[in-house]
Amino acid sequence: MATIPKMKMRNCIQCGRVFLSQEREELCSGCKAKFYELEEIVKDYVKEHRGVSMNDVSEATGISKKLIQRMAREGVFADMPMGENFTYPCASCGTPIKTGTYCTSCLTRLRQETKKVAEAMQIRFKEDMPTVKRLDAMAQREFDKEQRDKRMFRVGMKNITRSK
């Protein structure tokens, strides 16, 4: 049985129109179609002019560097042999990169920071364990009491029906 994707109301990041979005969609259908057209223009230009820089592509096609960078970050040029000049800045430090959003050193730093946060959360969870265990024990006692009360009620009802 196929699952139905979750749909959300969103504003298109390009034109601002409201549209129904699936998962991480950021563009409405009109802007998405235009984006794909521009993508093909850039791909064709890069295929014809190997070794070209992002600035050259932008100037020749009239497509903004920002949009070309977005295409590169999304992996549009991943299957194409790009020249050494076709770079864009890392989103964190500005170092020229060819793929992804972050350079290798920023990725390493982000992974280390994420690991530290995860470890801190584990420590915090361990500190809260006595509280969690106490709450769990209280809930278990309440459940047991409720079960005893139900049994006593059933036994009492049986005794009442027997005495009649």
Image (cartoon, rainbow, N blue to C red):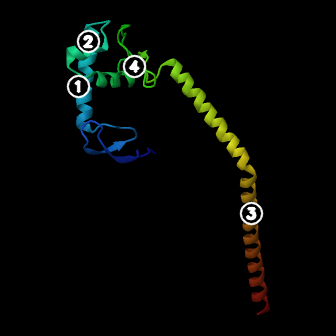
Amino acid at dot 4: Pro
How far across and down, in percent of the image, does residue 31 sit?
24, 34
Marks 2 and 4, Cα distance to the nearest angstrom?
16 Å
How far across and down, in percent of the image, does residue 49 sit?
26, 7
Amino acid at dot 3: Met
Rendering quarter of residue 136: bottom right
Label 2 with label 3: CB-CB less than 8 Å = no
Label disc, if present, on residue 56 of the rendered structure: 2
| Residue occupied by mark 3 | 138
Nearest to N terminus: mark 3 or mark 4: 4
Which class describes the residues within 10 Å of circle 1: few (<14), some (14-19), or many (20+)? few
**Mark toward the viewer: 1 or 3:** 3
Nearest to N terminus: mark 1 or mark 3: 1
Secondary structure of residue under mark 1: helix
How far across and down, in percent of the image, does residue 157 sit?
74, 84
Label 2 with label 1: CB-CB less than 8 Å = no
| Residue occupied by mark 4 | 89
**Mark toward the viewer: 2 or 1:** 2
Which class describes the residues within 10 Å of circle 4: few (<14), some (14-19), or many (20+)? some
